Image (spheres, rainbow, N blue to C red):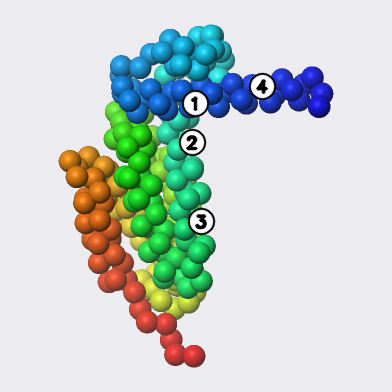
Amino acid sequence: MTVKGRRAEYRELTRGAVLDAAAGLFAEQGFAATTIDDVAQAARVGKGTVYYHFTDKAHLFEAVFRDRQEQLVENVAAAATRHRRPWPRLTAALDAYLEGAVADAAHRSLLQQAPAALGAERCRELDEQLGLPALQALLDDLATAGELSAPPGPMLTRLLFSALCEAAMTAGADPDPAGARRAAAEALHAILAGLRREPPAP
């Protein structure tokens, strides 16, 4: 490995350490109470190193939030691909999203803090960048199989994705997140049932 390659690897490892440290602090003590000094100390790097990778605390929080949401989307995709038929793939994906967003206390905390830390509009942009394409693909598969009663256009996708995000936020804020998650899943399944059409006979 060249010197340049080793430096790039070190920078990536350092960035990862800062993200992990920040994620833990944001989840435990909150965005407002966490300082860049706290993150640097937890990551065992200098304050200047944190600023080398992230312009400010909001930029750092966004990177943490995006990283955790990307991991969640990857888990959702893995859950969906375990099923051959498009309808079970869709329901498995929605259930996996709720499970990942609500069951983990750290992720639940980051999700609740994101609107205040980043602004509601930026949160929506990030959610749509990461989640909308995957949901659209699932709905397209249903339409191709003849199992969707409505056109799988952008409006339907946005409405369903908004319902999913709201369900995750509401369940995560509930005193009984596990029970609220189950109730949210049941509600989403009921909504989806109204969109299901039996596939045409072979």
Residue, disc 4: 10
Marks 3/1: CA–CA distance: 24 Å
Task: Answer with left or right where residue 164 lies relative to residue 146.
Answer: left
Task: Answer with left or right where residue 168 lies relative to residue 183.
Answer: right
Residue, disc 1: 19
Secondary structure at numbered mark 3: helix
Mark positioned earlier in the residue sequence (2 or 3): 2
Secondary structure at numbered mark 2: helix
> What amino acid type should be assigned to the residue bearing mark 2?
Asp
> Which picture quadrant has residue 101?
top left
| Near-viewer residue (101 or 198) | 101
Mark positioned earlier in the residue sequence (4 or 1): 4
Q: Nearer the viewer, mark 4 or mark 2?
A: 4
Residue, disc 2: 67
The numbered dot on residue 78 is 3
> What amino acid type should be assigned to the residue bearing mark 4?
Tyr
Mark positioned earlier in the residue sequence (4 or 3): 4
Marks 2/3: CA–CA distance: 17 Å
The quarter of the rendered structure image containing the N terminus is top right
Query: Which residue is at a point 47% across and 58% down the rendered structure image?
Result: 79
| Near-viewer residue (115 or 3) | 3
